[in-house]
Amino acid sequence: MSLFLPAMQPSPDGMWEVEMVRLDHGERLPVIRNSRTWLPAPLALRYVLSQRPRLRPGSLANDVRGVCALYNWAAQERTVGFLDDWLARGRAPTNHELKQINRFLRNAPEEADSQQGTPVVGAVPEERGALGEAPVVDRAGEVPATTYHRRLTSVLHFLDWALRADNAGATQAIDDDEHVRIVWRVQRLFREWAAERPIPESLTPDPLTLLDIHFVRRALGADEFGRWHYADVFVPETRLRNWAMFEVAINYGLRRAELLLLRLDDLPDDDDPLRNIRVARRREVKVDKGLSRKTPRIVRVPALDPERYDVVRQYLTHGGTEGGRCGPADAETRLFLRHPSEVKRPSARPAEAPSPFEPISGARFGQTITRIGELAWHAAEREIAAGAGVVTIRTGGTATAVKVTDRVLEELRTRLTGLHPHVLRHTWATHFALAHYGEHGFDGVVHLLQLYGGWADDKMPKHYAEKAMEELGQRAAAERLMALSTNR
């Protein structure tokens, strides 16, 4: 379909919703439309089109949902009305209006895409955990802290863009100095309000421990005798592929899209001891004042545990047996492909049937990782029961016996059931920081994490480095206490 700006203005009487519009080439574009007239907001539509080169589709949709909340606030304010007209008059929100916006962002229910249900203003919001647990109603009647922070960031970016006369089509232009002062004022207030409601640590999923990873590998792989104990969960044609996807995700810390876009020519050479893979990432480069574009950048990421790359080698060499890779072997084809047995044939003519070797979608990858977590939990229950609560973990050629208490078992169940793909990246960053902190120190770990992890800034790398410093300090203190007690 073609997008156009309507000649008539949307009615300010209706509320605003986010509509995911599918373009001719398959891209889904988030559009803010009026619930009564179904007409899009012209300014918001121009904002979406300007942000397409900078943001991924999922990030752009989340950003637009925050902007939609701003449109709904304006629709309820008699002094504001239609937000596009208000900004076109060169208006900037006062501190009092910013407080009203903040109150609305904290209490308005979370937006839903129009295909998934129409949002109801004033409904009691529901809070979901980071991994999609059952909703829990916030006691204060406010949205979750993560949603609130996302809304603040989205509104700040939108106001920064819309207050420029060229973007909003303002009849009364705001000069550059005034624009900087306004944005700085909004940013300062938003930071103060965000600090009053920080994101709880409980919403951050715990990384997988060595015990968790042990059970995942027990569930996915064959034992020392070549037996597949849990082979009935996945079809035989996908066993090695699913195991290889897990090992690549947890050993390289790739995002979901980065992993699924890997090609055969991105894999390491046979003589590479670090098993570096090539990851294509985008870097933002400023080309003019207020304008930027994303340029591709190739980063070589080493494996956290190079020995685990053998699973990928098995996947490539088995040729369709036990889930080995099948399909085109061209260097530019995807590494992970759907097996023909997974592709649902349409009821149309055979000539219109899709290719039997299609790339794996992000949704299917997420479902596979969640199923792997459930499978690992079942494997843990069986092994713990068979060993009378004692599990032997082998790392680096050494065997360690672990006593599994009721508390450890409950934590194990929480981490494995409902496993999310991003937890694997979280696990990689945590173990990478622990493994390299002693050699490189705090600053060195932050630099390596930002380089290999692909973060735009050092906020998250510093978080993982601080966690590693704290964990290693606790280990050293425990060792000193153990040495003192032994000497006595």
Image: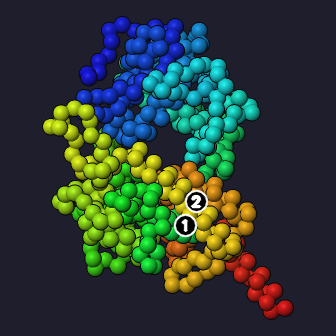
Query: Sequence-wise, which precedes: disc 2 or disc 1?
Result: 1
Residue 110 placed where, x, y %? 57, 29
Residue 451 placed where, x, y %? 42, 62
Q: Amino acid at mark 1?
A: Phe
Horizontally, residue 393 falls left or right of residue 363, namely right
Q: Is residue 461 above or below residue 274?
A: above
* Helix, strand or loop status at disc 1: helix
Q: Pointer 2 and pointer 1: residues touching (CB < 8 Å)?
A: yes
Q: Nearer the viewer, residue 83 or 165?
A: 83
Q: Quadrant of the C terminus?
A: bottom right
Residue at image mark 1: 215
Q: Is residue 381 above or below residue 122?
A: below
The outermost residue toward the right is: 488
Say which residue appears at 51% left-offset and 10% top-offset.
14
Characterize the local packing of mark 2: few (<14), some (14-19) or many (20 or more) Cα atoms within 10 angstroms. Answer: many
Say which residue appears at 33% left-offset and 41% top-offset.
292
Characterize the local packing of mark 1: few (<14), some (14-19) or many (20 or more) Cα atoms within 10 angstroms. Answer: many
* Helix, strand or loop status at disc 2: helix
Marks 2/1: CA–CA distance:
7 Å
Q: Quadrant of the N terminus?
A: top left
**Count of all numbered marks drawn on residues in the image:** 2
Tag of residue 377: 2
Say which residue appears at 41% left-offset and 50% top-offset.
365
Asked if one can make out residue 263 in the rendered structure from this viewpoint, the answer is no
Q: Amino acid at mark 2?
A: Trp
Residue 32 placed where, x, y %? 43, 22
Horizontally, residue 428 falls left or right of residue 346, namely right
Q: Is residue 142 above or below residue 457?
A: above
